[in-house]
Image (tube, rainbow, N blue to C red):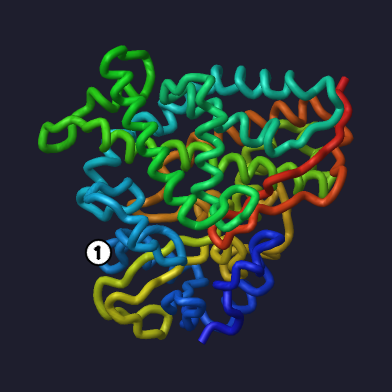
Amino acid sequence: MTKHSLANLALYSHGAPNHLIAENRQQHSVSWEAGSAGESGHWNVFATPEIDTVLKNPALFSNAAGPRLVDTPKEAIRGRHVSLNLMDPPVHRDYRRLVDAAFKPTAIKQREPNIRAIADTIIDDVIGQGRCEFVTSVATQLPLRVIAWILGIPDADRAHLCALTNTMMIADDPDFAGSVMEGYDAQRALVQYGAQLAASHRLNPRDDLTTDLLAATREGGEQLTDLEYGLLFLNLIIGGVETTRNATAYGLHDLIQHPEQFQMLQNDPELIPGAVEEMLRFRAPIMNYRRTAMADVELGGQTIRKGDKVIVWLASANRDEQVFAHPNSFDITRCQRERVQRDARTFGAGPHYCLGAHLARLQLKVVFEAITARMTNVQLVDQPRNALSAFVDGYKEMHITFDRRA
């Protein structure tokens, strides 16, 4: 049995309960947690080797039941179409192939000048004020504006899509949704928006990824329907905003807590890519993913039965003491000694490895280059507020003050 239950939402009022996760991991790499409040029980997977086994073997551990610990209500499942993050190979591979090329390092590198210009504009908007609410004004703005530019989303629609994204991803938090079902309603609204965006692009093609995706063909020669594009759009907008926003806010918070490391980045911007990897390791923006066992299987000394729910804890892998030295210390020089990018599991592993990982890394590099070059004496006004979620680990509010760097 799991030493500490992790299904209690109250545990997440201040982000990932890393000390409880660590005690669980140190006791068992895989352990059973009984269900409560109408939820079925599940297996927790805490150690990196077992996490990799689950994520890299979709035939044994299916993604089709969704990525979250909580069961999806039957009334929230409508229709036969599903999004990319509910597919298993080979269907998943066929759809993902359509967008893979647009998110490869070479393609992302070509977008860097525009991304840098967007970041500079965002900092321009706040630099003269000497203070801001960082999550809304900066951390959210860069990934939102970048994905909107890439997909050809009108500027006027960005705030609406951001609100829907928050409602869907953080439906447990009353600041974002009145009920869990509102989260599923927001999900459907995002799919519908994507389908309408596709229809608009068919009538008026533009130079953006949406037009490219609508022209692409799958292995059988078929093109995406508007609804299929809408389902793909859902993944692109969620993935495009969530990880980068949370990592940006947490990353700045951790630098504020370690001003000597902030100073190191100001003195030597070449350290920023390594600092980004440490930010992504130290606070996994998505704490866990769910899989479902498709057959009886042995894992970590436990017998998992067909149909059992399996939760892999990315937040645990990122602080696995068998992988990282002093894993609870934030250290932007860690990459000089350890293979953080390879060994962290922030972006998952296997066929569902995050499509936008290269884009997220580039945006984080660019935004912290801009922050460290143009701001100094960055301070917290008060304690940041976490979004209440057992899935997403991020701040919903962080007020800061700063001076313009000469």
SS of the residue at dot 1? loop
Question: Could you tell whether 192 is left or right of 47 in the image?
Answer: left
Quarter of the image for residue 215 reads: top left
Which x, y percent locates residue 139? 66, 36
Residue type at mark 1: give it.
Answer: Ala
Can you say whether 96 is above or below 115 in the image?
below
Question: Could you tell whether 375 is left or right of 366 in the image?
Answer: right
Question: Could you tell whether 63 is left or right of 327 in the image?
Answer: left
Residue denoted by label 1: 59
Which x, y percent locates residue 192? 35, 35
Residue at x 48% of width, y 50% of height: 183
Residue in the foreground of this view, choosing between 75 and 43:
75
Can you say whether 243 is above or below 7 in the image?
above
Residue at x 56% of width, y 32% of height: 143
Which x, y percent locates residue 30? 47, 78
All told, the count of numbered labels is 1
User: In this orientation, does residue 337 appear?
Assistant: no
- Characterize the local packing of mark 1: few (<14), some (14-19) or many (20 or more) Cα atoms within 10 angstroms: some
Which x, y percent locates residue 203? 27, 14
Residue in the foreground of this view, choosing between 112 and 81:
81
Residue at x 65% of width, y 48% of height: 279
Quadrant in which the C terminus appears: top right
Residue at x 68% of width, y 32% of height: 138
Quarter of the image for residue 95 reads: top left
User: In this orientation, does residue 131 appear?
Assistant: yes
